[in-house]
Structure formats: structure tokens, C-alpha cells
Amino acid sequence: MTGPPTFHPERSGSVEPAAGKTADFPTRVDRNGFAYRTKFKRWESRAAVRAKPRRVLDEEREDGKLFFPPELVPVALHPLVAERGAAVVDAVLLQRLHVYLDFTAELEQMSINPVTQRISRRKVGFAVPEPMVEDAYKICTDEAWHAQFSDDLQRQLVAATGIAPTVPDEPQFFRRLREMEAEAPAEIAGLPAIFFAIVSETLISAILSDIPRDERVVTAVRELVDDHAEDEGRHHAFFAKFFDCIWPQLSPSQRRLIGPFLPRLVLAFLEPDYEALASILSRSGLGDEEVRRVVEEAHPRDEVVADVRRTSRATLRLFHEHDVLDEPGTFEAFAASGLLDVT
């Protein structure tokens, strides 16, 4: 083979077939020095779905515990919200938790698992080593559990509070991803979804890192987020290596075409869901103009981009390691997005 293989989203390429199997079932991909070391050897005893109990709400709300850290919900700290009293702020935090849980279930079921399922069935369009195929099955199981326990906690919240959730019909990230998939040229059809999975799984969000340590927050929420974060550490390692595996298999033309989508994928995942926030605020009694003002003032564009840049540092480092930004069009897209650290 001379040069990278053609990307086929409907089937897997092969490099070295296993004995007794067809060429569509590669056992390793190491001709270019790629090596995969699994982080899932102790998965049976460590994965949340295997080792952790169902997280159940108790009566901590009577002790003043929070549903969500207010520092992670800037609209809750805005004077127009704060002046309406603690009950309104508390309602905003409750709905922000619902948005997070709904976001998680949608992400895992509708965006991540479709990709890991294709990896596990050797239909992702790239030659992938067998240990990675095996681990993709485990991630499918993990992500299904993350979606299920998020939905379960939402149901518990409704039962405990008597308040229905205010969540969008579909999260902002999913709408933006569908738009990018529609824009993608035929040569890279299917790649935005694959790279969105890589982006979302290699980021380290403040929610996953901060909430488990915040003792002001309801214990069941803290424990559930901690369960999720522990699993995601293994997923991060997997998807970083998955990127290592597939990027060299793209042709120069495919890299040139997908590159400008990458900063948009990062922003799609990490930007605040402005419509969801507006709905929460409207339900809290703010008028349309007040809602617009609160969302805009709580999320100044420069601060949003700076926060996304910090949160996506590991993912951007991964791109730099593979010289992704050497392509002029990709560099220009990242520069225009504000995600390049020029300090």
C-alpha cells in the first residue's frame, strides 16, 4: 500500500488479518509504529457499571445541600437572578443539574456509543487493533450505564422535588454536530461524528473534576459525577490513542477537509447551551429582555472562549502532537475561533 487508505465509513480497513479471519478483522496496526496499551485490564472490578451502586437521593436537601455548584452556573450569580431570592437561585441550580444529566444521556447514547459500536464491530472505516476493538465494547457498556444512571437521577429529582425538568428538545451540541455533518464534503462523510467523539472524550470538564470534591453539593450528585469521571479517565486514554491510530490513515486531502471542523467541534461541546439557559431563566420569572441580558452578561464571549481554551488543553495538545495545525486552513480556523493560546 502506498499512501493512506481511502476512508470508508461503512466498513473497516485492514492491515494484518488474523489467522482464520477475513482481511476485515485486523489484529494489530503497527507498521507505522502505532502501539496500543489498554487501560481496561481491571475494568471488571473498577468500572462503575460493575463495581458501583446505584446512587440514591436522601434527605440532604433539608441540610441546605446544593444541587449544583453556583460557580459553574454564572447565570445563577447574576444580580437579576440573585435579587429574586434563594428559592429562585435554587430552582436555577436544580434545572442546571437537569440540563447536565439530560446532556450526558444524549451525548452517551446518541453521539459516543454510535461511534464505539462501530469500532467494536470493525465498521468505523479504519484499521484498528484488536485490543482496541475489545475495549470499545467495554466503553459501549460504560456509556450506556452513564446514560441510564443520569436518567435515573433525573427521575429521582422529579420525585423528590415535584418539579419537572426544563431541558431542550435536543442539546445545542447535537444540533451543531448535525449541521457540520450536513456540511461535510462526501470525501469526509461521517468524520465529524467520529472526531466529535474524540474531542468530547479527551476533554476534562470542570464538572467532572470539581463536583466530586464539592461537599456543598448533594451526595448522590457528587458520587454519580465521580463514578462518571473515573470511567472517563480510561475513555480519555482510549480516544487519545484512537486519534493516534486513525489520523495517519487519512489522506492529505481528508486531513485538509476535516481540520477546519475541529475547532467548531470543540466549541460545540464546551460552549454554554444558551437556549437551555434562556429556558431556565424564563421559567424562573424573568422577562425576555432580562433573560437576554443575563445570558449575555453572565457569558461574555471572551471569557467563554478563554474557558473553552483552558478546558480543551489536552485535546489541543493532541492535535499539536500530530501537526494538525500545520495545514493553513486548519490553522486559520483555530486562530479565528480564539482557541489558540498566543500567550
Image: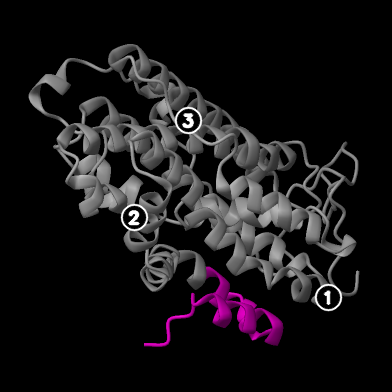
Q: Is residue 94 magenta?
A: no
Look at mark 3 in the image and give the residue it sits on: 146
- What's the amino acid at mark 1? Ser
Does residue 336 show up magenta in the picture? Answer: yes
Q: Nearer the viewer, residue 137 or 108?
A: 108
Query: In the rendered image, which quarter contains the N terminus?
Result: bottom right
Q: Principal SS element in the magenta part?
A: helix
Instruction: Give the x, y percent position of residue 184.
Output: 80, 61
Q: Residues within 10 Å of mark 3 (few under 14, many from 20)?
A: many
Residue beneath label 2, please?
A: 294
Q: Secondary structure at mark 2?
A: helix
Image quarter of residue 301: bottom left
Which stretch appears magenta? Answer: 318-343
Residue 54 in sight here:
no
| Residue at numbered disc 1 | 253
Q: Residue at x 53, y 69 (%)?
A: 318
Secondary structure of the residue carrying numbered label 3: helix
Q: CA distance from mark 1 to mark 2?
A: 43 Å
Q: CB atoms at circles 3 and 1 under 8 Å apart?
A: no
The quadrant in which residue 96 appears is top left
Q: Residues within 10 Å of mark 2 (few under 14, many from 20)?
A: many
